[in-house]
Amino acid sequence: MQSLGKRVLLQALVTFLFSLGVVYLVLYFAVRNVYIHQMERTLEGVSKQVFSSMYQVMKRGWKREDLFEFLRSIETSYHETPLVVNVYRGEKVRSLFGDVPEPEKSKEVLRAFKEKMKLSLLRENESIYIYPIGARSECLRCHVNAKEGDILGVIEARFNTGAVLTTMNRKILATLIFLLPINILFATLLAYSIRKTINKVSSSLRNAIGGLSSIEDIDKVSITNEVPYREFKDLERSIAILANKVKEIAVDKSILELETKILEKFIVTSELVNDWRKYVGKLLEDVNEIIELNVIFSLFIEGDTLSVEVFWLHSPSEEMKNFSENIIHREVISRLPVTSLSGKELIFHHHVHRENERLTDVEEEMLRLRTKVLLLEKPQLGGIVGVGLNSELAQDTYKHTVLDAILATLINVIGSAKAISTHVQEVEFYAMRDSLTFLYNQRTFWELFNYELERAERFGRKLSLMLLDLDNFKVINDTYGHVFGDTVLREVGRIIYEKKRKADVAARYGGDEFALLVVGAGVTEAYSLAKRIKEAIENLTFIAEEDKVINVEVSIGISTFPDHAKNPRDLFILADNLLRKAKEEGRSRLKVPSYEDLSKIGSFLTEKSIQILDALNKREIVPYFQPIVDLNTGEVFANEALMRIGKHRLPAAAFIEAAENLGVLVRMDLILYEEVFKKIKEQGYKKKIFLNFSPRVLLLEDFSSRLSSLVEGLGISPGNVVFELTERESVRNIELLEKFVKVMKENGFKFAIDDFGSGYSSFYYLKRVPVDYVKMEGEFVKDIVSDWRDRSFIASIVALAKGMGIKTVAEFVEGEDILNYLRELGVDYGQGFYFGKPSPELKE
């Protein structure tokens, strides 16, 4: 620890040295300025004296030899001095009497000739004075070509000030250096005196504190008897204030223990997020083991509803319920601002934790309420939480302090649960829906497609798929703008939703493409419905700029299970091919499959399968890497490994579905993992790596041990390996997945949810599986700049993830504007073409 005496000495020395420096600067510049000013006056006098001497000689009349003699005398007079005097002839004199030897005219001399004015200049180490010689009336007798006021010549006086100023500077420094030891001695004596005084006070205070045996003894502490200085009297008053504060916060030990025991019950678990009402009921039971509480209630304003949740430990009678409602209404609700109650529907919900145990009715004077208020800006949520307690407890001042702590924690716990619940509802909605048309999105469509196909197969029914694509939408969008284009898409979505049957599933598949599952319908029924939808869409009229009427056309492709294909992917490929064929044949058409179409789709699937199996046999499965960047620092945080196959390095989108149908995806993933880990070892890569994870690996009994051995053998830290849970395949046994993830996390591996928000499974994973990262669906990221719904969705995911301690990753970051929005919303990491395209090398 630093010595106070040394610090005082050091500060005193620094102060004295600083003072000497200031004195030096002040003296130097003051003397310098006086000297330079005096030099200017001296040079002016010399110039005038030279002119006066010249004038006296000229009055008597002089010859050219006299002029040369005069100039030599000036040069001789100042030869060994810092002073230099030069005399220059003007044009008028030169034209009459000719040239004489003189130095080259400087800019200042020429300026004096031109402006007919005196000049005083200060340059580095030199003072200059220039004196112009103007023609007088008596001069015109000889200088017949001049008129009064013309400049006949210029006298220039220069003085070298550098040597003088250098000498002066040395003398000032020598004087101050001579005074330096005196200053050091004075600083040492001052520091010693202060240190001695402080040591005396410290010793006195230490002795006084050593004699303390209780809080009251603090009042006896005194130091001014030893050192009667005003500053130490202030210290003594501060000690007295401290004593009073200590007395105020000294609380009975049993009260503190009671508060600690109660607050230990407030542990936030996943149960709170899943069912906060059940959590509060259990909390009421736990708290009653320590302190008697009759009831806990919460009141939240949500939209047009004023919702009151009343939690009872034991089952109350109807009279007791009405009695509690009246007290809550009178003591709490009636005191709320009128604006908070206007137009709100009041709803009471009673919850009983122990329904088999009856609650003895209590009188009104035996029930008192204490409450806390919570207000949240995002989401807009206002709430009150209160407890009902018996009158004896209500009169205990110390226990009121405990209750206030309970209520403060309880309002935060319940408020957090309500806020998370609100965010989850928003996230669930936007996870399933397209934000523009509110039809189902692509991922939800595929989940429902698989579900409906399984039902159709189970019950022996037909299922038709209808794909619709607007023919001229790109032209409309480019010509009239995205706002007008969005209006067209919303109206088309509305028509599809209104024309479909209740059981049918409508989705916006992407861009200007829509999909419709016609449940229980064959080709004929689907064709009839498609015709009605097509007519309704093409009868739509839109008014663009300058009252221009715009109409749209639509092409439709239809495929039916089991007539045309047996699985969702084949049905989709067939319908998509028919849709493209309708466009090629002139657009605004309906197409159903012919024998030729069915033959082509079978050929396509066969060729793809051969390509995949060939790549697997030759181990032509290689990883490409795309960087994941920390949005706060801009540094690479991780890389995602992406699968490429074959000589042409086909991306996963080109073969993933076919690989799943062939049942070889797990083998391909294992080969990819090996190649990734070898690449990490080869490059000495130390950051995190994200790997796609297929739930089918759960069927391999030794997968976790094989993977751990592989990582350990290559010296790779398991904490840097993050597996992305994908939704290509449903997980029918969630307990198996939970067990697997638990084992892997115990070994140090991390987990992420991929394409979060795109379907039901995302939230199911989040609820059941402890993940570390959430990778948000790129469909919600790419339009974040122009679509407020996407921004709201992202904000909801971020809030949900932060509430659960999970980091967020945004995909499809393709521009700086998207990056800036993601930073504002608090997203942790980003991935997309803006940071880098997939390549064979790991990015660092």
Image (cartoon, rainbow, N blue to C red):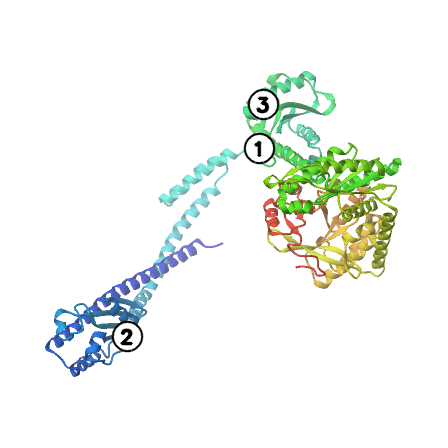
Q: Do the residues labelled 3 and 1 touch (CB within 8 Å)?
A: no
Q: Which of 226 and 766 is in front in this view?
A: 766
Q: What residue type is labelled 3?
A: Ile
Residue at the image position 27 percent from the left and 71 percent from the top? 110
Q: Find numbered disc 2 in the image and state the secondary structure of the residue it sits on.
A: loop
Q: In this view, does 42 lie to the left or right of 563?
A: left
Q: Where is residue 456 in the image (x, y as percent from the top left)?
A: 86, 37
Q: Which residue is drawn at 77% across and 34% down?
A: 500
Amino acid found under the numbered disc labelled 1: Leu
Instruction: Indicate the amino acid at tag 2.
Output: Lys
Q: Which residue is drawn at 65% across and 17% down?
A: 322
Q: Distance between the residues labelled 2 and 1?
A: 84 Å
Can I make out residue 381 in this image?
yes
Query: What kind of element bears circle 3?
Result: helix
Picture quadrant where residue 384 is located: top right
Residue 398, above or below 754: above
> Where the C terminus falls, by quadrant?
bottom right
Q: Mark 2 points at which residue?
A: 105
Mark found first going from the N terminus, 3 or 1: 3
Q: Which residue occupies the extreme bottom position in the image?
A: 65
Q: How far apart are marks 2 and 3 (CA)?
A: 98 Å
Does residue 531 lie above or below 20 as drawn? above
- Residue 333 bears which disc, if any? 3
Alpha-carbon span between mark 3 and mark 1: 16 Å
* Viewer-closest of 346 and 105: 105
* Between discs 2 and 3, the one toward the N terminus: 2
Q: What is the quadrant of residue 37 in the picture?
A: bottom left
Tell me if mark 2 has few (under 14), some (14-19) or many (20+) residues whose alpha carbon lies within 10 angstroms of its own.
few
In the rendered structure, are the residues bearing label 2 and label 3 in contact, judged by CB atoms less than 8 Å apart? Answer: no
How many numbered discs? 3
Q: Name the residue under label 1.
A: 375
